[in-house]
Image (cartoon, helix red, strand yellow):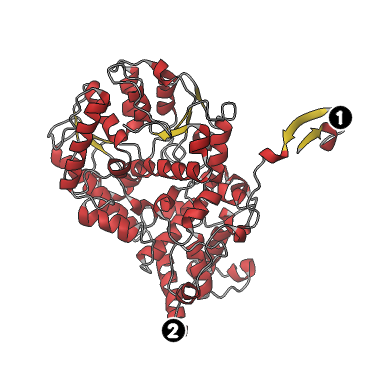
Amino acid sequence: MTSNLKLTDISTKEGQLIEYDLNDIPDLPLDIEKLPCKPFSDKMKEDYACDLLDGVSVLNIPRPKNALEEQELVDKFLSGMRKLFSTENNWTFVNMLEASMDTCAQCNSCSEACHLYEMSGGHTMYRPNFRSEIFRRIYHQYIKKEPLAKLRYGDMPLNWKTVVRLGELAYRCNLCRRCAQVCPIGVDNGLIAREIRKIFSQELGISPQELHTKGTELQMQKGSSTGMTPEIVRDNVEFIDEDYSEITGVGIETPFDKKGADIMLIHNAGEIMAWPENVAAFSLIFNAAGLSWTMSSRTLGYDGVNYGVFYDDAQTARIAIQHMEAARELGVKKIVIGECGHATKALTVIADRVVPYDMQVPRETCYVTLRDIIKQGRLKLDPSRNNFPVTLHDPCNVVRLMGVVEPQREILRVIAPQFREMPCNGVHNYCCGGGSGFAIITRNNTNVWRTNISGRKKFWQISEAFKECLGPETKKYICAPCSNCKGQIRDILEENDLYTKNSFAYGGLVELIVNCMVDVNPGYIKWEGEEEY
């Protein structure tokens, strides 16, 4: 079915404006209650306190058994909230939080900028200022105790149902802070959502098991959020070296525990397990460029993951300090963080707030390190090996939240002749949909929500970037230099059958660099359907 949009439809002038095929326009999930989610079982409804009607439960908050437990839940929440506005207890973020508490213009600029609100079909509970306004009213009435609070907001007795719904609402946000970027008065709704999460973790002991039990706690116990101990990591990296030496025709040896090196490289350890080509690519590039570098086999020293940034300051600090200690133990000049957005932010701008100054070691995103290698001509490159369409996904944590925009583009302009930007790129980029920890959460319908709601705008961006070359005849590469973003983009591609129908490949920036290194065997990047290494 084709329709002609005429100028007279929107103005007084004549003529055709555009022709489009209605079948090419995907329907939005206008009713989130109709998502293909498994309904809550009767047992879940009995055990858990909150169902926000989208079929998702992230926190699994236990349902209070009696009035005493209901009041205890409210009291603990208020206790935690008071601590958020105490310099002694929240010296990391209290100033920024207070700046978002005074007022909100209710202009809904934040809603218009939010991919979750848009892709839910404009559902009210996904408005960034919806949960913030509830939080703000509690603050003025119970924490600041303003005489005018009752006149300003009316009498709003706080009950346990409001508390648990607010907790779940804080996990209907990717913390991408696109909303904060467009707010005309500087309200940071993403920060508010994160601080609500912090109350539930640090005061109520409630957090997603993937971020806490299987995340930060496992990382501190074993050395990695993957559960890999130092011995296992060294064995795995040694195997990767051997395997990719044969694949590339270049001998690879990853140095461990080399004291006095210029650089300590720290990966998201998920790369070692899921994307070994990324780990091998870093070793190939650093060795070929003649860098003085090493990895650490100290517990936590090889895994840059720090899921504490999504929900808990104490966990964030504990892990960041261990990363610094690993670097100090080796006496390196700086830490370079591999392709992981949240790990980069956690170990740089967040660590600046939670790690004492005298324990800090200089840190740098790998984008800058790689840019310098390319610009200095340290590698022999043949960009014609990358003569296929390439687009770039900007990880929120590095680009919008840290302002690192150009280094990765400077590289792509050199090595990718057909590089093209996604619409809404750079600091205006949309989250992949897996941000703030969702990329690793799959239970209770979260995976369905990730691909149908939170990842839907990224699917649109990818489709728009390659709209002139969709189809299996043209190979296309999505450069996503972040481990969690890659996992989310993989799920988006699989959900929409883009792998098999469109010859897509996804991967990092370093794989694309290695693919055009003249000393490396051709074909480092593999597309779906091609024979594995």
Report the front residue among 411 and 456. Answer: 456
> Seen in the image, is 360 located left or right of residue 421?
left
Q: Position of residue 68 (x, y in %)?
A: 44, 84
How dense is the environment of label 1, judged by Cα within 10 Å: few (below 14), some, or many (20 and up)? few
Q: Callout 2 environment at 10 Å: few (<14), some (14 to 19), or many (20+)?
A: few
Q: Residue furthest left?
A: 259
The tag earlier along the polypeptide, 1 or 2, is 1
The residue that label 1 is drawn on is 13
In the drawing, does residue 412 fall left or right of residue 380?
A: right
Residue 66 coordinates in the image, percent (x, y): 46, 84
Q: Amino acid at mark 2?
A: Leu
- Against 349, residue 502 (above or below) is above
Residue in the picture at 34% in, 61% down? 89
Q: Please say if 387 is above or below 79.
A: above
**The N terminus: image quadrant:** top right
**Which residue lies at the image location 49% right of the left edge and 69% below the top edge?**
164
Residue 68 is marked as: 2
Q: CA distance from mark 1 to mark 2?
A: 68 Å
Element assignment for label 1: loop
The quadrant of the image that shows the C terminus is top left
Amino acid on which disc 1 is placed: Lys
Residue 102, given in percent of the width and then of the height, sits at 55, 57
Q: Which mark is residue 255?
A: none
Report the residue at 38% width, 30% height from top.
Answer: 526
Mark 2, secondary structure of its residue: helix
- Asked if residue 173 shows in the view, the reply is no
